[in-house]
Amino acid sequence: MEEAKLWTKNFFSISICNFFLFMNYYYLLVTLPIFVIQDLKSSEAEAGLIAMVYLFAAIVTRPFVDQFMEKLGKQKMLIISLVIFLIASISYLFVSSIVLLLIIRFLHGIGFGIATTATGAIVADIVPESKKGEGMGYFILSSNVAMVIGPFLGLTSLDHWGSFVMLVIALICSVGALLTGGIVNLHEMKPKLNKRELFKVNFSFEKLVEVSTFRIALIAAFLAFAYSTVLSFVSVFAEKMNLGAGSNLFFVVYAIVLLISRPFTGRWFDRYGANVIVIPCIVSFAFGLFILSMANTSFIYLLSAVFIGLGWGTLFPSFQTMAIQIVPPQRRAASLSTFLSIFDIGIGLGSFLTGAVVVFTGFTSLYFYTSLYVLVGLVLYCLFVQHRFARKPKSLEHDRKSSLQQ
């Protein structure tokens, strides 16, 4: 029997589309605050709002995406979201006030929320069941690479060519997302609907939220809270510690570790099950944070990136894969929207609260106590999630099919 293929045209296209989406996200994440302060002459507090508005729009949009995908199809919803994403990116070129920018960021966040839910649901459908862990791992690797390239390219463009060129490059990323997303061809069967049925939305809790995903999503959000300390402050920490040239290489090392480890971790996930990957990776994440708390040289600082990259960089795609494994195919989009919304809340709260905490603790103490916090996450995972994934993925799939037949 011929082995199911992972690297199809659809998989490659949707992964590149995801790369461009997150390139735009991380690119603007670091450059827009500077643009707000320098070009719009606004305050730091107003600059901080632009990230919150974006995430808020994505979070409130995601629960409704599943219903519209059922009516229009995943492919059409992806194209709609990418057009919204592109319109927002074009609009940045004409921003003249902070109020207008916040409106555009809200629109942009809506596009991002729909697009990231649609791409995840499409990948969940096109990746063979026997390669779910490997496929989701490679798919999310595209956003990990964007996380490294985006901020570097954004700050470089802003420093050397100014804000207009910076915004044009962000627009090019949006065009790239639309072009590559448009190549995806799913051959979906879509029901015939009238306009009244199309815009009818079911606001019931059961329809908007996938309850069975809560435990995995809450554990992911709990650990994302810890990762936000790295995402938001690791560069500032390096600067405070005077770590020199190595301070700019943290996320480069992080990405290299993922590129090397992903072919193995994804396959092991599929072969041996989630727990074999998740538990060691939580330990690796905690150990990486502990090393980071002691970093006084570039070597130790970059060594922490190795363990954090192997830990958190593997945990996120693993949790997302688990979220789609425990639900029937028709609930995958709802499961992903629930997972991503709760996850984003964890990242957002972490960035906000740790910013206040670090003022009193300092970076060394922050990362030390965060490493202990992650170990608490390990205990919570073992208590509330581990038992559900004690078997291999095939066993889980068999159980899910059996429950659907009953």
Image (spheres, rainbow, N blue to C red):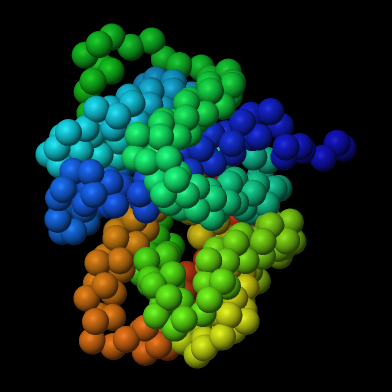
Image label count: 0
Closer-to-camera residue (111/65): 111
The residue at the far front in this view is 160
Any part of residue 35 in sight? yes
Any part of residue 126 in sight? no
User: Is 346 left or right of 253, judged from the image as shown?
Assistant: left
Give the percent coordinates (x, y) of residue 286: 51, 81
What residue do we see at 57% from left, 66% from top?
Answer: 249
Q: Is residue 266 above or below residue 284?
A: above
Closer-to-camera residue (12/239): 239
What residue do we see at 87% from left, 37% from top?
Answer: 1
What residue do we see at 40% from left, 34% from top?
Answer: 165
Closer-to-camera residue (37/59): 37
Give the percent coordinates (x, y) of residue 186: 58, 23
Q: Is residue 299 above or below residue 348?
A: below
Give the percent coordinates (x, y) of residue 42: 14, 50
Q: Quadrant of residue 306?
A: bottom right
Closer-to-camera residue (191/43): 43
Give the percent coordinates (x, y) of residue 251: 55, 63
